[in-house]
Image (spheres, coloured by chain):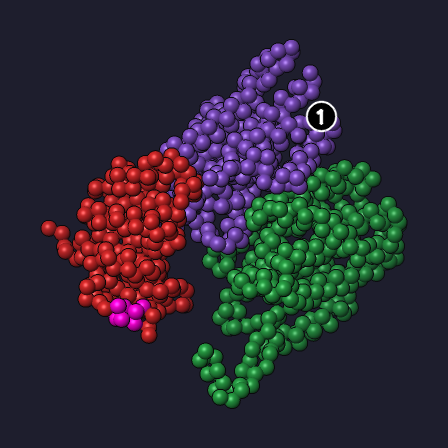
Amino acid sequence: MPEKRLLDIRNLDAFYGAFQALFGISLHAERGETLAIIGANSAGKSTLMKAIVGLVTTRNAEIRFAGGELAGRPTQQIVREGIALVPEGRRLFRSLSVEENLLVGGHLHRSGPWSLMAIYDLFPVLREKRHQPSTSLSGGQQQMVAIGRALMANPDLVLIDELSLGLAPIVIRDIYAALPRVTAAGTSAIIVEQDTSQALAVANRVYCLRGGRITLEGTPASLTRDAISAAYFGV
Amino acid sequence: MSAPSFHIARSTPESRFALVIGLLALVALVAGPYWIDRNGMRIVGEFLIYLSLASMWNLLAGYAGLVSVGQQAYVGLGGYFLFAWAILFGLPPLLAIPFAGVAGAIVALPVSLLVFRLKGAYFAIGTWVVAEVFLLLAAQISVLGGGSGISLPISVVRSIAESRDGRDMAVYWSTLGVAVAILIGTYLLLRTRWGLALQAIRDGELAAETSGVSVATAKRLLYVVAGAGGAMIGALIFLAKLRISPSAAFSVNDWTAFVIFITVIGGIGRIEGPIVGTFVYFLLRGLLADLGPTYLIILGAVAVGVMLFAPKGLWGLVADRFGWQLFPVGRRLVLDTSASAATSKGA
Amino acid sequence: MEWANVILQGILVGGLYALFATGLSLIFGVMRLVNIAHGDLIVLAAYVALLCVTQTSIHPLLAIFLVAPVMAVAGYGLQRILFNRTLGADLLPPLLVSFGLSVIIQNVLLQIFTADSRKLSAGAIETATVPIFNGLAVGVLPLLMFVAAVAIIAALQFMFYSLPIGRALRATSDDPEVARLMGYDNRHLFGVAMALSLAVVAVAGVFLAVRANFDPALGPSRLIYGFEAVIIGGLGNLWGTLAGGVILGVAQAIGAKIDPGWQLLAGHLVFLAVLAFRPEGLFPKVDG
């Protein structure tokens, strides 16, 4: 019987050189949960995602994941433990086709529900475009590839940074519509969003970040709009 | 809040000290022929030549990001210019030096149009190809000895000065003059807005493009200046040697590899770097030159080691530790009272 | 017919230049590293072949199968120990470290083997020819060299576009940070790329040693030929690199035919002309 708590972060400080971007972040996620992390531009959301996967230097942090300690370990090892990050701006491999991008995501061959077939069932439009260069896709389709590429690793937890940023509303709706199928397959998710309403609709719990600190935490039902905007804008 | 008092400072206590030492050294060097023996003068001359070449390479690689492995093109060009000037046209050899500089600049401009199309490391090899082309062309000039080279005729040598002492002095003072001009020129160039803009780019400050200075123009300017300086130094080198050949004139080892090692070991991107590096280089050479290839293996290994473990060079290690800056090129804002430090708050 | 022969010889030598260039192009493509010591590593491979042949008295061309693994392992080590430490946004460290390595290799070879020129004798195959028509004939050895170049480029092309390791190398080249997010260890992948590069270098080194005299100072000019072939062909295109090598070889052959002093110059001038009129190369990679 695996532990119920999947991710447990305590007291995380993150730095870019001498500049401190995150201050004493504590956050946790249970198995099967979908978390939303909301906050304005440069609140530290992306830094938090990068800190979890070891792309940003952290100090004093305890990052326990599925019972093991992640802090200070190199990114490629953290990823092997079962965390996948969909980076801000999608960042598909330009010289690879759609299917090659997905195969690269799955090269670790962890066992789990996700395979090329499962991804194509989740986002059918990608099946038609599987042999096209990834650069020929629309922004929304690229985001589908980026999410699919992360899922191909069969992670226990997928982090999606700025899911809807720069995408057309109709595609955003399609992607959000697919998310429950991701969590239903047993993959927990943390979604970083500036667009609060979309995130609140799918999340079990919400964290709000401002100035590198957590300013609010709770279930969507328990939070009033005033409380959220106070935490979000600091007014 | 009362207006804070401050002034713009360029000098530092160490820089004023360095200025005094520099002036004393200059006086001693000018008087060199009266207290240094012939062998000593030869070594001082070589020292000045390497210091000048390293300062100019530092200007290119350390400030403008132009890592050239082909500066021997201009050294050789200057050397051949001198020999053509004296042998083919019978003009006074010493006068060739400034004109070699002009020739270096005139050649560097079109060359820059070509090699500037290559970026980064490819630029490095591109400049090397240009130097190879110069070498092969020089080997085709049969009136200047073709591939095997040529010596300066006795009559030309005599025209510099009748006595050997007189010639040594003339070459020595010319070298000193050109070296001092290059060093001061390098320093002043870095203090112009082009120089400051290049340092801003190197340090990753994006404001440079908006400061009204075209980065491309600044880089081209530095490349042309380094071409001119390299050619003048080349004329001096082969005026002292009295003999030239394509392989000696366009030697990548002598005029570029050692120069790169000097700059890297001393500290790239700092004016003090080449000075420290040249001292270290002459020290190592004095200690190890008898070892032949082993000496070069050690020199290469030291340069690689410095690049990996102390990328700011020996001077960088010292300067960071003590906060020294002997040749301030930037301007610093100095607040006159410590209390006014609070003015930076607020906003 | 005399000219046809000159051009044919130039084309075949171009295969060797393409071999010089392929390893250079490969590591630039994967990690944006320009290895100034590349030419010296080719010469080093030639000396390793010399040792293999003198110690085991196998045929020089078969020595490729000994030298290539040795150089590949050396390349992996070199990358992990030395070059990986230099990679980053700043282009100076890799450039200067490889420049230092170049001087070190040259002088180590000089110390061990002296400045005397050496040659590997391949026996009868050196003088064997294949008649084509009308008295036109090609040497078996140059032909073998060219075939080897084509085969190696085809194999690399297959690896890059059809095998998982090639996909990994392309992904790392596109975005090293995201490649780490996929669980790749870039330091290892860069090591693999350098190992491949030096395996190709080994083949080039053996052919260099069999074809003509070699000495420790030969490296820099081999680097330059390889570099010129890469730029003439266009960055990021291995078949273009082969074409670049052929163009360089033909230019040198024509130059030499006119005047022996013009052999090298003609090659450089073609390179400079390409730089002046088609700086992206003759066959640039089409992106996307």
B95 sits left or right of C225 in the view:
right
> Is residue A76 in the magenta section?
no
Q: Residue at x 48, y 33 (%)?
A: C200
Query: Which corner quadrant holds the C terminus of chain B?
Result: bottom left
Magenta stretch?
A225-232
Color used for chain A? Answer: red
Question: Residue C99: x percent and y percent?
Answer: 55, 48
Colour of chain C as rendered = purple
Question: Would you say residue A226 sits in the magenta stretch?
Answer: yes
Q: Nearer the viewer, residue B211 or B166?
A: B211
Q: Nearer the viewer, residue A188 or B138?
A: A188
Rendered image quadrant of residue C244: top right
Q: Which chain is green?
A: B
Q: Residue at x 45, y 31 (%)?
A: C157
Give the secondary structure at mark 1.
helix
On screen, B266 above or below A84? Answer: below
